[in-house]
Amino acid sequence: MQNSATMSLLRTTAMALSALAAVTIAQADEPVVFIQDGEPVAVFTMDTDWLTDQGYLASAPGAGDLTAAFGADVGDFRLSARLAIFNLDRSAASFVLDRDNHFGFEGNTGTMFVEGPLFDGGMRTIGNTVIDDGVPFEFVVERRSQSIVFSIDGKVVYSIKAHDRRLGSLGFRPRRSRMAIQSMTFLGATYEEERPLQYVDVFLAGHDGYNTFRIPSVVTAPNGVLIAFAEGRRNNSGDSGDIDIVMRKSNDGGATWSGLTVLADDGRNTCGNPCAVVDEDTHTIWLAYTRQLKSDDEAHINAGTSQGTRTVWMMKSPDSGTTWLPATQITESVKDPSWRWYATGPGVGIQIQMGANTGRLVIPCDHSYPTNGDDRALYDVGFGSHVIYSDDHGASWQRSQPVRPKVNECQVIELAGGALALNMRSYDGNHRRRVAHSTDGGATWSDYEDVYALVEPVCQASVARLTWPGLDGRSRILFSNPASTTRQRMTVRLSYDEGASWPVSKLVYRGKAAYSCLVTLPDQSFGLLFEADEYARIAWAPLTLEWLTDGEDSIGAK
């Protein structure tokens, strides 16, 4: 349903756009129409937050990219759009060209910019903006004689030399601004773009009283309901301050989500790092998290100059997330007194399925510790990973031997035969994940090894088992992270040999992306909850094995 503010914007923009002169396009060939009179004719959208009314297509707050269904093939072309941009001061709205390239408007500085490989790398200011907030304009992009030329209201504002090659993913990104597009047409050779995945926003920045949502965790409850957890950061996007643990539920496999429930709120202090695990024996969901004073950020805690420290808490739901019992502090049993920073997860824990430790609950964690020289560039502390585990269905918890140095945020997976693998974020500068193994249910760990197949930008990742060997045809383990040296290109990988190799990979989201959490569903499909667009959203992507393998593998295949 459209609110009054949205309807007012629609009416205002419709009147303004109606005053524009028609775009003149050469008649050598018929143009491809992407948007006409505000109706999407040949576009893909990231979500449903683009509304058609009053003769134009308008983005609701926080809407994702609007992408044309066809890309620009080789040869000259002319793309023309009539649009207006609102709330320019909020962030950098842009035209997207060939997936990773942006021509945009930065309202905070009143400038135009370009960014991406086509423009030789990082963001670069190209001059003062020539548009006004809410005032419609004609935007034209042309390739001619191996140059790409950008024009606004008939005036050339920028041009670059460009090779004559395919340029896909033509479209617009509103970011935290808002866009209203009356028309978008293309004259030139086209090719059909691969239809992008459909995403659902679960947590959206600026909504429900929170500036930003971060740190996703998602589990399938014993009754089949999906439960998503996150940090709700009240006043800003920082890692400390007024932060709550929040939750949403889905009864339809992630297609729709419930209203927001606040699970942990310590006033203006921090409740962070939600990490859930399901006890399949007792049908209980356990949620580990940490607390700290609002004034104690990571730097002060690591330096030993904070007023307090990070404490560790556990809460549980006996009824698939309908009710939650009060949290209990477990710091004394799971945190070495010499440790400084401490984090549960991020992500999820597991319950061991076979061997001597069957039924054990295992939650991945990390910590920092004082050091005499190691990692001195990072607050004079070292960083390590560990797990906490329970053999009495959550009644008590203990910590494992740590894995060190230069690793921290981690996820744990059970391998066929009963061993565990701890997949860790690395600070060694080689942009690769590290993995250690345990043969005693996570109590002790081997030295770690670099996994060169798993590139990372120093970021959290997720790992989950999809199928067991023998039970569902073959072993299948999933892995997700931003497969890049920067936080972008959210990718899912597949291993058939217990993580020794990762021969299958597929891009989930090409843009900016960071933390993620994989979860399997009762129908043996799976999904990914991930941070996108510089923490503007935590989105849900429903996925299948057939999609991941382009139809070459399916559940039950050997």
Image (tube, rainbow, N blue to C red):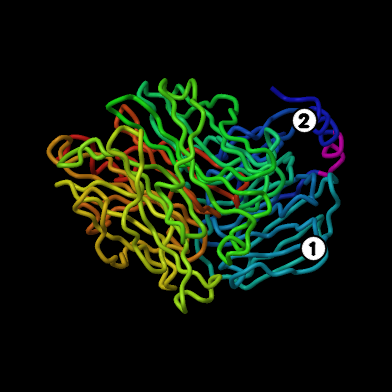
Residue 125 disc label: none
The residue sitting at the bottom extreme is: 373
Which residue range is magenta in the image?
15-21
The picture places residue 18, in percent across and down from the top left corner, at: 84, 36
Residue drawn at point x = 76 percent, y = 47 percent? 23
Q: Quadrant of the N terminus?
A: top right
Left or right of 468, for residue 539: right
- Marker count (numbered): 2
Left or right of 5, for residue 483: left
Secondary element at image label 2: helix
N-terminal of the pair, mark 1 or mark 2, is: 2
Residue 189, visible in the rendered structure: no
Q: Is residue 199 above or below residue 160?
A: above
Q: Amino acid at mark 2?
A: Thr
Q: Is residue 423 above or below residue 213?
A: below
The picture places residue 263, in percent across and down from the top left corner, at: 56, 31
Are the residues tagged 1 and 2 within 8 Å (C-beta)? no
The picture places residue 517, in percent across and down from the top left corner, at: 43, 44
Q: Amino acid at mark 1?
A: Thr
* 18 falls in the magenta region: yes
Quadrant housing residue 51? top right
Residue 278, visible in the rendered structure: yes
Q: Is residue 281 above or below residue 368?
A: above
The picture places residue 301, in percent across and down from the top left corner, at: 58, 60
Residue toward you, 397 or 501: 397
Left or right of 500, for residue 290: right
Residue 111 disc label: 1
For disc 2, the marked residue is: 6
